[in-house]
Image: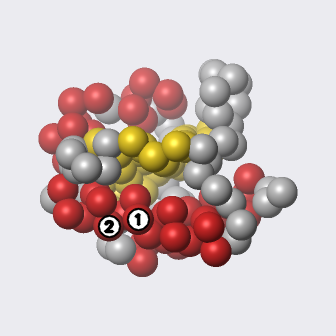
């Protein structure tokens, strides 16, 4: 079993490989029992959303992690990859702005790169 911190690094690397924008990591351990970490990333188009999802799935499988579920990648507005300890939300800009998961789950969430500029 791979540790959550290592899995998070694999996910971030996979998203960066496909130029995911404004990657945010939100620790939700104290807020929900569904998952420990949420990763939120923007994909500019339906095609990029799908590419980001595919990149995450391929990279985690290379480390013998099988996603519990993948949803929404066919529509390409908001896709989700459930990895158990980590849930990845890949969203187009308008959907991300509308749902504002960072504010919902913790507005002070640090970005993956450690800066607030995105």
Q: Which mark is residue 51?
A: 2
Residue in the picture at 32% in, 42% down:
72
The reply to whether dot 1 and dot 2 touch (C-beta < 8 Å) is: yes
SS type, badge 1: helix
- Quadrant that contains the C terminus: bottom left
Q: Where is residue 52 shown, x and y percent of the image?
A: 37, 63
Residue in the picture at 40% in, 59% down:
53
Seen in the picture, residue 110 relative to 44 is either above or below; the reply is above
Q: Where is residue 100 shown, x and y percent of the image?
A: 32, 32
Circle 1: is it few (<14), some (14-19), or many (20+) Cα within 10 Å? some
Residue in the picture at 30% in, 60% down:
50
Residue in the picture at 63% in, 27% down:
34
The residue furthest right is 1
- Mark 1 and mark 2: span between their CA atoms? 5 Å
Q: Which mark is residue 97?
A: none
- Quadrant that contains the N terminus: bottom right
Along the horizontal axis of the image, is 93 left or right of 2?
left
Q: Determine which quarter of the picture holds residue 26.
A: top right
Q: Where is residue 7 shown, x and y percent of the image?
A: 68, 60
Circle 2: is it few (<14), some (14-19), or many (20+) Cα within 10 Å? many
For the image, the number of numbered tags is 2
Colour scheme of this structure image? secondary structure
SS type, badge 2: helix
Along the horizontal axis of the image, is 13 left or right of 76?
right
Q: Determine which quarter of the picture holds residue 96.
A: top left
Q: Which residue is mark 1?
A: 54
Q: Is residue 42 visible?
A: yes
Q: Determine which quarter of the picture holds residue 37.
A: top right
Q: Is residue 116 visible?
A: no
């Amino acid at each position: 079993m791979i540790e959550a911190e290592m899995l998070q690094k694999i996910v971030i690397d996979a998203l960066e490989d496909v130029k995911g924008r404004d990657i945010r990591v939100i620790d939700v351990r104290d807020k929900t029992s569904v998952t420990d970490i949420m990763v939120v990333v923007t994909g500019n188009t339906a095609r990029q959303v799908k590419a980001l999802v595919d990149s995450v799935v391929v990279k985690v499988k290379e480390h013998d992690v099988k996603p519990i579920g993948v949803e929404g990648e066919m529509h390409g507005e908001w896709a989700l990859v459930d990895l158990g300890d980590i849930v990845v939300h890949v969203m187009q800009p308008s959907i991300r702005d509308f749902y504002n998961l960072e504010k919902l789950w913790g507005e002070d969430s640090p970005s993956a790169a450690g800066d607030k500029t995105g």
